[in-house]
Amino acid sequence: MREATPGTTFHGLPLTPEQHSEIQHYIHRRQRAGKEWDTPELQAMLADMLDPPEAVAASQVDDEASIAAERMMADRDDGNEPMPH
């Protein structure tokens, strides 16, 4: 991993090389279109990159309920009566 220096970060933010590239691509696209690049959309992108929303961990109970529902739907799609599993 490269060292984070002012020359390799966007405004000194600790972004990965992929995130930095995505930001630079956004700015380049906006500039080519003759539009302002410092937008609320860019701020939202940066906020998500620096503090990504946490994925909700599914519980085993949720998984089992989902599997049971899928089995019931599959049984119905086959034209069969739902069978207890």
Image: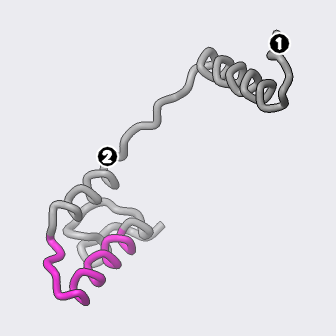
Which sits in the foreground, 61 or 43? 61
The CA distance from mark 1 to mark 2 is 42 Å
12 drawn magenta: no
Could you tell me what secondary structure mostly forms the magenta stretch? helix
Which sits in the foreground, 61 or 81? 81
Which sits in the foreground, 67 or 43? 67
Q: Position of residue 7 (x, y in %)?
A: 27, 78
Who's the residue at 16% across and 61% down the image?
A: 40
Instruction: State the extent of the magenta-drawn residues as a range.
Output: 20-38
Among all residues in the image, which is located at the extreme front? 79
Identity, as a three-letter code, of the amino acid under mark 1: His
Who's the residue at 47% across and 31% down the image?
A: 56
Mark 1 vs mark 2: which is more N-terminal?
A: 2
22 drawn magenta: yes
Q: Quadrant of residue 35?
A: bottom left
Who's the residue at 52% across and 28% down the image?
A: 57
Q: Position of residue 28 (x, y in %)?
A: 28, 84
Identity, as a three-letter code, of the amino acid under mark 2: Asp
Image vertical order of residue 10 relative to residue 52, above or below: below
Among all residues in the image, which is located at the extreme top? 84
The answer to whether marks 1 and 2 mark residues whose Cβ atoms lie closer than 8 Å is no
- 33 relative position to 65: left or right: left
Secondary structure under the numbered disc 1 in the rendered image: loop
The residue that disc 1 covers is 85
Secondary structure under the numbered disc 2 in the rendered image: loop
Mark 1, residues whose alpha carbon is within 10 Å: few (<14), some, or many (≥20)?
Answer: few
- 66 relative position to 82: left or right: left
Q: What's the mark number on residue 51? A: 2
Q: Position of residue 33 (x, y in %)?
A: 23, 87
Image vertical order of residue 57 relative to residue 84, above or below: below
In this rendering, the label closer to the viewer, 1 or 2? 1
